[in-house]
Image: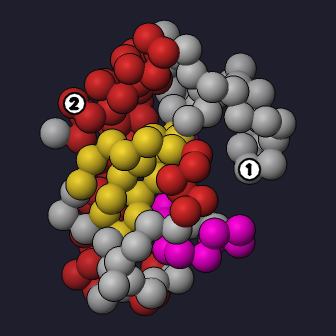
Amino acid sequence: MFEIDPAFLATSEPLAELTLCHVRLQADARWPWLVLIPRIGGLREIEDLAAAQRALLMEELVRAGAAARAAGLALGRPVEKLNVGALGNVTPQLHVHVVGRRLDDPAWPGPVWGVGQAIPYAPAAWAGALAAARAALG
């Protein structure tokens, strides 16, 4: 049975339901950052998905990249590079991060994980980022 790990609920907001994945926007104003969580219980690794599901995950990752770019534009910080990662070292439930990066972001050129503390969005910026990302996801 599919359940979202509580760690995601505390740090992100639901964004969309795609064919395979539940998509969330991280509540960290430093980056337009989406998390895709396949809605299949018990998954830990991409290899746990069937071949057709892996192909669908790739398509949904591309859509999430467009959504991260749209959120970046809404925030006035266009995305220059997308980072995609499926780490799972802290939260083992299979999930994939899609993070919009810029040369002037606080972690550039390193990874975003473990860099400082999350910065909350201002309410208007949060609403704009959510709306732009949802529109891009269709």
Q: Is residue 81 visible?
A: no
Residue in the picture at 53% in, 82% down: 44
Q: Residues within 10 Å of mark 2 (few under 14, many from 20)?
A: some
Q: Is residue 60 above or below residue 123?
A: below
Q: Is residue 59 above or below residue 49?
A: above
Q: What is the three-letter code of the residue carrying label 1?
A: Trp
What is the CA distance from the residue labelled 2 to the residue labelled 1?
Answer: 27 Å
Residue in the picture at 44% in, 11% down: 124
Looking at the rendered image, the quarter that the N terminus falls into is: bottom left
Q: Is residue 101 left or right of residue 118?
A: left
Q: Is residue 3 left or right of residue 12?
A: left
Question: For residue 110, what is the image quadrant?
Answer: top right
Q: Is residue 79 left or right of residue 29?
A: left
Q: Which residue is mark 2?
A: 135
Q: Secondary structure at mark 2?
A: helix
Q: Is residue 14 magenta?
A: no
In front: 58, or 131?
131
Span colored in magenta: 88-100
Q: What is the three-letter code of the residue carrying label 2?
A: Ala
Quick check: marks 2 and 1 in contact, CB under 8 Å? no
Q: Residue 21: x and y, percent?
A: 31, 63
Q: Is residue 133 above or below residue 44?
A: above
Q: Which residue is mark 1?
A: 113
Q: Could you say which disc has been placed on residue 82 in the image?
A: none
Residue in the picture at 40% in, 73% down: 3
Q: Residue 109: x and y, percent?
A: 76, 37
Q: Secondary structure at mark 1?
A: loop
Q: Residue 108: x and y, percent?
A: 75, 33
Among the two numbered marks 2 and 1 on one chain, the one whose residue lies closer to the N terminus: 1
